[in-house]
Image: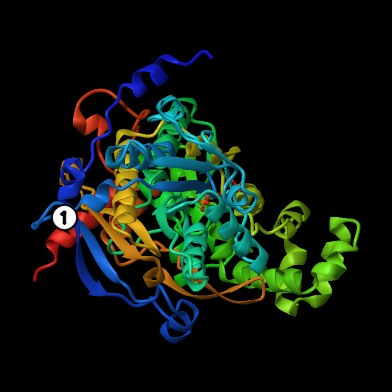
Amino acid sequence: MEISALQHARYRYQPRFPRVLSQELSTIALSQGLATQSIADQGALKALFKHTYGKVLVDVVTRTGEPNETMHRKLTLGVLLSGGQAPGGHNVIAGLYDGLKRGNPRSRLYGFLGGPSGLIENKYRELSDAIIDAYRNTGGFDMIGSGRTKIESPEQFASSLETAKKLRLDALLIIGGDDSNTNAAGLAEYFLDQGSPIQVIGCPKTIDGDLKNEHIQTSFGFDTAVKTYSELIGNIERDANSAKKYWHFIKLMGRSASHIALECALQTHPNVCFISEEVAVKKWSLSQIVDQICASVIKRAENKEFFGVVLIPEGLVEFVPEMKQLILELNDTIATYEAELAALPSLTDHLGFLRTKLSPAAQALLGSLPADIARELLMDRDPHGNVQVSRIETEKLLMGMAEKRLARLKEQGLYKGKFSALRHFFGYEGRSAFPSNFDANYGYSLGLTAFVLIAAGLTGYIACVKNLTALPEEWVPAGLPLTMMMHLEQRHGSQKPVIQKALVDLAAPPFKAFAAARDTWACTTSFLFPGGIQYFGPPELCDRPPRVLELEQQGRANIKP
Ligand code: FBP
């Protein structure tokens, strides 16, 4: 098969990783930290996770005593990729594989095909040197595929254990986002409950950047995705500044939190960017959001600048309070009347049926939305009960509302300029790009770390690599108990234990930096053109971590003891 010149060159890239992980494996140990608690609902979670709740934090360190030969025992591992693609996933598997083979060349690694369903249905391929080498430093998840099946029913748990036993697995690595790592926590607990010693470890993947906490600084994939989108936004900004005739409405992926939109704004300086978390706190309505877009259009028109760029996080609709209420009511109603809805032939019938079950306010809002947006809100939920926000055309909704508003203002003589708008959605373009050096290094380091946690006998943990703004050699590999990130959440109409998504912190330096600059960006053309991801060249071009990480780090350094 023909491969590109870049793919050839990337095969030769040697990922960098924490120095401690380059030591002879028997000289590595885990230092134990404090016991942990879940972020909320401690009593309920302790009862649900009897075997895995409240474990201690661990760091990977140099061993002080005798070498530990258990690191070299022969192991059989399984790995699966879960959820949306994220650049760096192949490197996690490569890191796990290299660690495993360094530990013992007779160890084996099975990759489950198509995500969690591969585990449930016992579909796998054994991973070899040739397979791993063909995917080193490449994007996508095509080595073994991915899927969104949620391991939920007693039968699915039992089949997963059956597969793991059939293959004589010592451990399973689940590479995924919040929902997939919730699956990992559930499986780790279930295996122990069934008397099985098979370990389960998770790994933080998602371009959305919302699987993070004080230890996990970001998920792998975020850096490459935001750099890809920022390149495209910068190109559009330059085109807008050249043609001077279009306003571009750009929806950016990132299901719920606005980390992607915030990072892209910091990298490109658009005229307007919404951060969903701020919209929720300030309780902005759709109409107030349109006010802000129009204010920028009008201000810029005064300077004869009839062009601009608006960034819209894809999760925005779920944060506008009136829309959030509507979606919550729709989610519950859809879950409650599943059978009745299945019997109705068309979406129009669904819409008619659902309207009768909603509160008057939600009914009114649903009725006021353009028909295609209302239909998009009713589309199937994903297996975890989430609305598929990537399929709701929020950019179209806001563009249409802004067009109408400006036309009205023009009729009233309050706006004299032109307004011609185009819309874009950047999402899938960034999920399978060649991983940036940061993500190639980070993914590989997470894979090696996962191997060490497995070899040390842990279960119910997520692999973590800290200190990410330093050089990769200074990064700190660690493990966190999965239950510490969990709480109870309403899903499919009932309370379920899940890992909480990390939202943008409005009090933290990245948002503050954006908020301090946005009024200027709204009026003047301050565009920044980051260009494409650079894989070879000086470190300041090739190895820079995301801005939000740098700003968060500076914020920490500024905190006086
Ligand atoms: P994960 O949470 O699984 O990493 O997926 C993230 C994401 O890319 C979201 O940003 C987006 O809303 C969603 O996946 C799209 O899902 P799908 O690939 O099923 O269309």
Q: Rate crowding at label 1 as few (under 14), some (14 to 19) or many (20 or more) other CA atoms within 10 Å.
A: some
Q: Nearer the viewer, residue 114 or 368?
A: 114
Q: Nearer the viewer, residue 177 or 541?
A: 177
Q: Which residue is mark 1?
A: 61
Label 1 beta carbon less than 8 Å to ligand 1: no
For the N terminus, the image quarter is top right
Question: Which quadrant holds residue 338?
Answer: bottom right
In the displayed orientation, state which residue is furthest to the bottom: 43
Give how far across and how far down residue 356 sits, in percent: 83, 75
Q: Secondary structure beneath disc 1?
A: strand
329 over 480 or under it: above or below: below
Give how far across and how far down residue 443 sits, in percent: 35, 42
Does 115 sit left or right of 356 as displayed? left
Q: Nearer the viewer, residue 287 or 359?
A: 359
Identify the residue at horizontal 60%, vertical 43% (top origin): 114
Does 521 sit left or right of 291 as displayed? left
Identify the residue at horizontal 30%, vertical 48% (top origin): 73
Question: Which quadrant holds residue 331?
Answer: bottom right
Identify the residue at horizontal 86%, vertical 58% (top origin): 348
Q: Nearer the viewer, residue 328 or 39?
A: 39
Give how far across and how far down residue 335 sits, in percent: 73, 70
